[in-house]
Amino acid sequence: MPRKVAFEAKIEHLQILDEKGKVDKSIGVPAGLDDNRLLEMYRWMLFFRRFDEKALALQRTGRLGTYASLIGQEATQIGAAYAMEEQDWLVPSFREQGIMMARGVPGSKIITYWNGDERGSMFDEGINSLPICVPVGSQLLHAVGMAMAFDKRKENRVVLGFIGDGGTSEGDFHEACNFAGAFKAPAVIMIQNNQWAISVPRHKQTASPTLAQKSLAYGMPGLQFDGNDVMAAYQATKEALDHARSGKGPFLLEAVTFRMQDHTTADDATKYRDPSEVEAWRPRDPIARLDAYLRSKKKINDDQIKQWEEEIAVEVAKEVEDRENLPHPDPLDTFRQLYTGEMPRHLQTQMQDMKENLG
Ligand SMILES: Cc1ncc(C[n+]2csc(CCOP(=O)(O)OP(=O)(O)O)c2C)c(N)n1
Ligand SMILES: [Mg+2]
């Protein structure tokens, strides 16, 4: 007996700028990305990379606790940053320092955070970003909850929440997606699929051929894009944010990218990852790709890059200096920063105890 189709769907993949830096003519450069903006985005990507290299060097010389590098993932983060509007909120995980900085979080805060200092989680009023979040997946519940609140208050804000490929196996991811779908929350969930979750490869994470298709179970659209293509990252995020902003509910994005470095400085990827895999991704480098495009249009040259490199070296050094010039934290802040409301009695007692022992 013939059966009716109960549900049918497909997941699209978007690429605009190919590995050689050529634009797909059938799509074209996204409206909203003129050459000047593309140059700004290039400079930011270079800044992210140099900032990360500096952070890795600080860690190796004992000046930084630990660090999670975004090298290889610059395009997704800057593309998404440019697609957001001023009033939108960013909810990062722990590898989103690029988009955080592009949204106004000072680099010194990122370094302060990774030094285990809570002042790295305190941002000035007007910076619409939550702090770094290490418990995998938990940040998306905050993201969707915030989006639901903005919706109830009729505020024109969309929340962009980030998660990794590994994070999609957490219950928190599914609960966040379910709430977002059921309540039509103005939220965009961005999965940065960098192919690895510490030592677990993407193919062992889930049997789903794509991560974007997880959207279907929660009644929201999903789109996969080339995460090393800055134009696709911008376009995909823009479409998703527009969708959420217009009251149609959430959107799930999957950026297909690659973690070029170790998971964090506490990891050694050579123990579980074949170096040939890293080499295979090198030609897909997001910065080189935009470089090739802008050179072909004669919008960039070696002199300009050299000037940026010099400026960026000074800017990165300034962020480190700002961090290292901070006065030592008060150990009692450990207690004070846990509660913005009233501190429970048992913690007050412990705090008093510590105060006396500190002398
Ligand atoms: C709830 C929880 N479980 C385990 C960890 C340890 N941990 C930190 S990052 C990570 C893997 C995350 O992989 P993915 O989501 O792909 O993000 P990526 O690190 O690749 O950016 C794990 C297991 C954690 N921080 N939180
Ligand atoms: Mg990952």
Image (spheres, rainbow, N blue to C red):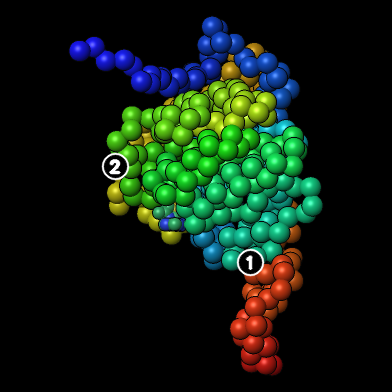
Residue 230, image quadrant:
top right
Q: Quick check: can you spot residue 316?
A: no
Mark pair 2, 1: CA separation: 35 Å
Position of residue 291 measured from the top left corner of the image (x, y, whole percent): 59, 24
To which residue does mark 2 refer?
204
Mark in the foreground, 2 or 1: 2
| Residue 211 seen in render | yes
Residue drawn 48% across and 40% down?
178
Question: In percent of the image, x 34 and y 49: which residue is there?
Answer: 199
- Kind of element beneath mark 1: loop
Name the spot of residue 60 as percent of width and height, x first: 51, 60
Say whether residue 189 is left or right of residue 111.
Answer: left
Question: Which numbered dot is residue 117?
Answer: 1
Residue 160 vs 200, above or below: the answer is above
Q: Callout 1, which amino acid?
A: Asp
Q: Quadrant of residue 154?
A: top right
Looking at the image, which residue is at 68% across and 56% down?
Answer: 109
Q: In this image, 45 relative to 205: left or right?
A: right
Q: Is residue 236 above or below residue 270?
A: above
Quadrant assignment for the C terminus: bottom right
Residue 95 spot, x, y in % from top left: 54, 47
